Amino acid sequence: MTHPYAGTGDHTGSYYATSANPSPERPPVHGDITADICVVGAGYSGLSTALHLAEKGHSVVIVEGARVGWGASGRNGGQIVNGLNASLQTIERRYGRDTATFVAGIVQEGGEIIRDRVVKYDIQCDLKPNNVFVGLTDAHMRELEARQALWRSYGIDNQVMLDRNQLRNHVKSDLYAGGLLDRTGGHMHPLNLALGEAAAFESLGGVIHEMSPILSADTMAARPVVRTAQGSVTCKTLVLCGNAYLGHAVPDLEPRVMPVSTQVMATEPLDPDLAADLMPGDDCIEDIRYILDYYRLSADKRMLFGGGTVYGGSDPKDIKVKLKRNMDKVFPRLRDARIDYAWSGNFALSFSRVPQMGRLGSNTYYAHGYSGHGVTGSHLFGRILSEAINGDLSRFDVFAGLKWYPFPGGRALRVPYSVLGSWYYGVRDRLGL
């Protein structure tokens, strides 16, 4: 079939796809289907929403444009990092103390959902604890200290400051001045998490249709309809979780977010002694620069190293070259390591860096725009969407009521505007400001 954005629809040639657990191919939508609830997208947002609803006894159908976890959910860095892209300080300044207090009360919930799902459904995804934010300069360390103090002011006190020597118990690199350890973070095989959640959903009677990109959606109807190349789904409630890959199918949502690509590569399996020496804590690491590096060890001791952004969602010419020079700065001893895999994928950026949630019409819900923090955010928002559909709008209404901001210049200028901003902050990173 001709696919509008995913080629054959098969998973990209990533390390995750190669090491994925077995998963069945689900049939596409054929003919006209009716459903109580239709969820568009079998990434984390859609799977989280659908699984929560299925656990509550609802009948749910998922319509996925490619394969389960094909997009960001199956390609990301695999890091469980608490918080939104926008800081609590930014949220308080923009939306007020009450909203910031509400957000602070739920920023760790996404990680809790993941850990609960893994245990409850015995999902084999190499789940490991701990993430560490690292700083390269004294200014970065002051920023991390301020972050710890801010989170403590909201009652979150599970982060530990690490000086240069203490950090070496987690990562052996001379590049860093110190770090901040979050023991409620962690990392896992992201595609296997998605596949496990899909299997859990199906075990409760849920139905998934793959290879069914939606061409249009009637979101304002009392009974919303989504149309694909080979059929349609008419439902009582529609949930749109296409995020960066929804494309032009829902014009009302398209200007709210911008696709941005980020890249990851995987080395050959490292000698176990070398891997343990470089990453003695076996944590996931990310630095706090605007254009950051993030990395961790896989279960088979590959270094999974990611970073970089391309606004508009295109792929760089040579991912390996782009990322290898950054990895060599962090770990000079990996300079000769073979790179076995390199891939790219899109996340949806919102201008405010705050995820968006709301309704189109009376019976169509949506969530998107996690801005690079989608692993935890999508699981949380899936639960909140399920609460709203089940009749409890209390948490949904808080996010639905937050003002969203369009990208300056609209679709025509949003990419050059963002590139200019990225260049400015990149200069600040290089100057250590």
Image (tube, helix red, strand yellow):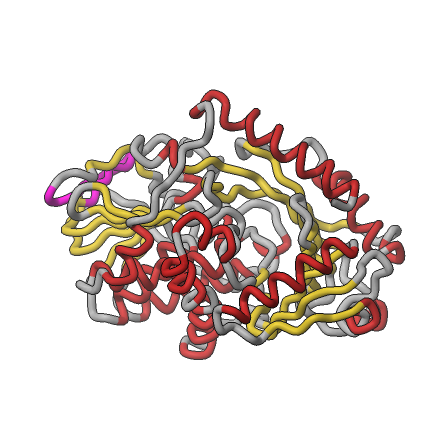
Point out residue 379 in the picture as x, y percentages from the top left corner: 41, 61
Q: Residue at image x 43%, y 76%?
A: 116
Residue at the far top in the pictured view: 412
Q: Is residue 173 left or right of residue 36?
A: right
Is 224 covered by the magenta stretch?
A: yes
Q: Nearer the viewer, residue 167 or 334?
A: 167
Q: Is residue 325 magenta?
A: no
The answer to whether one can see residue 108 in this image is: yes
The quarter of the image holding the N terminus is top left
Q: Is residue 271 left or right of residue 144?
A: right
Quadrant location of the C terminus in the rendered image: top right
Q: What x and y, as percent, mark residue 66?
A: 42, 44
Which of these two is toward me, 230 or 310?
A: 310
- What is the quadrant of residue 103 in the picture? bottom left
Q: Is residue 200 above or below residue 330?
A: below
Q: Can you see residue 71?
A: no
Q: Position of residue 34 (x, y in %)?
A: 15, 49
The part of the chain drawn in magenta is: 222-233
Q: Residue at x 40, y 33 (%)?
A: 406
Q: Residue at x 69, y 55 (%)?
A: 287
Horizontal relation, residue 377 to residue 432: left or right: left
How many numbered tags mark residues here? 0
Image-based side of 249 in relation to 7, left or right? left
Q: Is residue 97 above or below residue 342?
A: below
How far from the left and from the top, in percent, is residue 243? 41, 44
